[in-house]
Image (cartoon, rainbow, N blue to C red):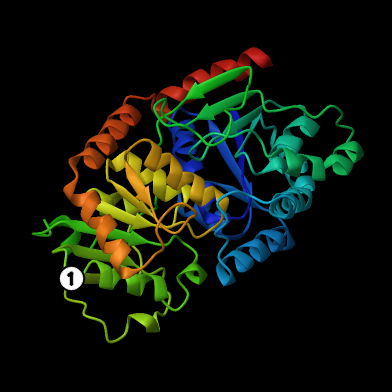
Amino acid sequence: MRYLFTTIPGTSYMLPLVPLAHAALAAGHEVLVVTGGPALRIANEAGLQTVAVDADAAEPYEELVRRATESPMTEEAPSPELVSYVASVFGEVGARMLDRLVDTAKAWGADAVVHPANHVGGLLAARAAGLPAVLHGIGTPRATFGPALGYLAPVAERLGVTGLREADISVDLCPPSLEPPHPRAELAHTLPMRYTPYNGGTELPTWLLRPAGRPRVAVTLGSLAGVYGDGALLREIVLGTAELDVELVVTTGGAELPALESLPHDHVRLVDWVPLNALLSTCEGIIHHGGMGTTYAAFDAGVPQLVIPLTGPESAANGRVAAARGAGTVLGTSGSAAVTAATVGSAVGDLLNDPAYRKASREVSLEMRGMPTPSSVIGRLTALIEDMA
């Protein structure tokens, strides 16, 4: 079986696809990844064979990232204007990738196309090449992004694809006890699969292998350095946790953070980057920006979460999912407290001292670890695709 994986040119959209791709290779199948930008680097570093799309395919997504980092999108609910803009971004990325996708699928002899929900070009490429489409979740489930599909209607017409329909099979990473903010896609086949955190490989620092001696709390604002700004938000987090007797491990994404200068750092360890799954295995809590990968890595590790949404409605929705399950709390959205040193300190203190957060987080972790692994899902997925041939 030949699996063509494809995603938009972003790090956080490639990482969740790697475990299934590795499982396919381990089962004796062939895997090819078609993407660009940072996602291409992630795929190559994961040992996957790739085909690069034209460099200009990443430009609309890079502009979205620039806008989000220069003026964080903190809306709790998406406005019609924001939905329209994001749809145009993902639609245009798909349009620019489409010819390379279709040509590669046909030339390589792909048997199926695997894509995440926002990569509408992947779904259209599967239909244009006459192949089964597999919708791969990256966390809480959602259907392929309909407004972006609408953007691609003229391209679909050019390719002779009419009545563009949803994918044939869904790979769903969401455990049943979580309440997703979007309706689950109604597909002919849905395959639950355990979320397996993949963060890449590196040499681990020796301090990470030893007990901290006091509760360790991770802090990350994601993989985009621009989100960190000058460190003003991290300053509130550092000041707010100074009296809690914790070790605060702050991943900086390599950003320069002048706002952290001249602060008491006795309880703080600053690192550019460490694999989040390795860090969380030693932590009692995490403070983060609401990214899907970070949220699910914390669920997998059974670690309570303080979510400070920074990248728009989806990050706020991820925070609500954690809070609704009792596995975390949210600051900085409507109906919640503002983000100050005092509110951060209070929230982190609650997370560490109220055993209900730890209990709920561990329940989700155990639930996720009881879900089918990628190695078992790939067999079922292959059988379904073979039946469609």
Q: Residue at x 62, y 55 (%)?
A: 9
In the image, residue 79 above or below residue 244: above
- To which residue does mark 1 refer? 267
Please state the horizontal and vertical placement of residue 200, each as a whole percent of the image.
39, 53
Q: Which residue is most to the front?
A: 335
Query: Front-most of 271 and 76?
Result: 76
Q: Which residue is most to the left?
A: 213
Q: Amino acid at mark 1?
A: His
Query: Front-most of 227 and 378?
Result: 227
Within 10 Å of disc 1 (Cα), the crowding (few <14, some 14-19, many 20+) is some
In the image, residue 349 above or below residue 239: above
Q: Residue at x 13, y 64 (%)?
A: 245
Instruction: Indicate the quadrant containing the N terminus: top left, top right, bottom left or bottom right.
Output: top right
Instruction: Indicate the quadrant containing the C terminus: top left, top right, bottom left or bottom right.
Output: top right
In the image, residue 258 above or below residue 361: below
Which element is circle 1 on?
loop
Q: Quadrant of residue 142?
A: top right
Q: Quadrant of residue 114?
A: top right
Q: Is residue 91 left or right of residue 313?
A: right
Query: Front-most of 143 and 27?
Result: 143
- Residue 216 shows in this picture: yes
Q: Residue at x 27, y 45 (%)?
A: 303
